[in-house]
Image (cartoon, rainbow, N blue to C red):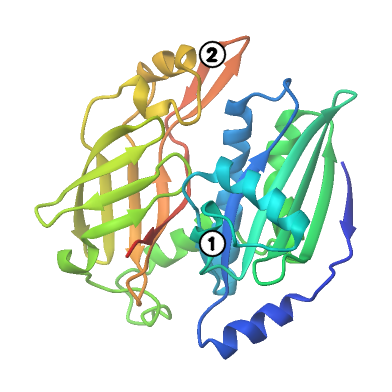
Amino acid sequence: MKTSIVVALLLLLSLGVQAQQQSTQLVFAFVGISSVDEEISRAEIRVLENRLTTALVGIAESQGYSIIIPRNRDLIRNELELSHNAGQIGRGPELAELVAAHGVVAGEIHRVAGQYFLDLQVIATASGDTLFAYSADYETYLEALDGGRDAMYALFDLEIRETYEGALAERESNAFSPARTDTDRFYQEPSTELIIGRWSGDVGIDQIELFPDGRGIARIPGGHTMRLRFETQADQIVVVQDEPNAPKLYLGSFPYSLAVQIVELARPMRWIFRLSRDGTQLIGSKETTSVRVEQGRVVGADNSFSRAAAWERLP
């Protein structure tokens, strides 16, 4: 794999100064990946977005950033391209959702002569300037999936010191240790009152509402909903899928022909979170199913798969 870093037009330090002046942490919005190539399916793009989201959540966790996963990302990317060209980020109706973000993370993937080319960039919402850009090329789509995390870390000029899942596992193994060092970052015994309300989900979920009786409802792509149930366990918030599998649950990432096959193989979804001390983020992991597709058919399913996940509280 060959990689090349494009010199940043502005230093990330400038964003740090801006955030310090506003007495808040740096906030980045991930608007996903686009492609104009018909050979790259929407399902392949969604899977790549999942990998990049996992990497971005890990970066945010290690660097103290906050991540926003906006709704209507496809519309936002289209409007972002127009406003970016005009140097006026944030003036369109869809981009109003990005007003709280200091920078927007976006990407493109293309297939040329059998190779995959991934381009990532961070755009300053205040000025429309490109702060950082990173490009990488891969021999196969699977190499692009494997290399996506490295590319996201390289975009922020960071080395991968540990995976987010590893950091989470270490924290959980010390959950009842008096020597814990993150008590100032997470609630140790969050009450139901602190958890209920509306949340913005990560990839595959548009919005969640959690109710005082432990029920929840998730709005998923296509105008569908999924019933949820949640409970607190010490410092953890466990959210589980509370209805049988159905094709609608997978249409955000897969076409219907694959979704009906996944229904028979996938385990119920489950999230294990911790509540940030300021009450604005649920940070943790999602237990779900990774599927392998060949020639339009699901040929394998890994029900031990999990990835990093984060939800943002909505007003």
Q: Which residue is mark 1?
A: 98
* Rendering coords of residue 247 (x, y %): 36, 20
| Image quarter in which the N terminus is found | top right
Number of numbered markers: 2
Q: Residues within 10 Å of mark 2 (few under 14, many from 20)?
A: few
Q: Does residue 246 lie above or below 311 as drawn?
A: above
**What kind of element bears circle 1?**
helix
* Rendering coords of residue 178 (x, y %): 32, 81
- The answer to whether mark 1 and mark 2 are in CB contact below 8 A is no
Q: Nearer the viewer, residue 172 or 292?
A: 292
**Which callout, 1 or 2, points at the residue further toward the start of the chain?**
1
Residue, x 43% and y 19% (percent of image)? 259
Per the rendering, the mark at residue 78 is none
| Image quarter in which the C terminus is found | bottom left
The answer to whether residue 50 shows anywhere in this view is no
Q: Does residue 143 lie above or below 232 as drawn?
A: above
Q: Quadrant of residue 147?
A: top right
| Residue kind at label 1, given as amino acid type | Leu
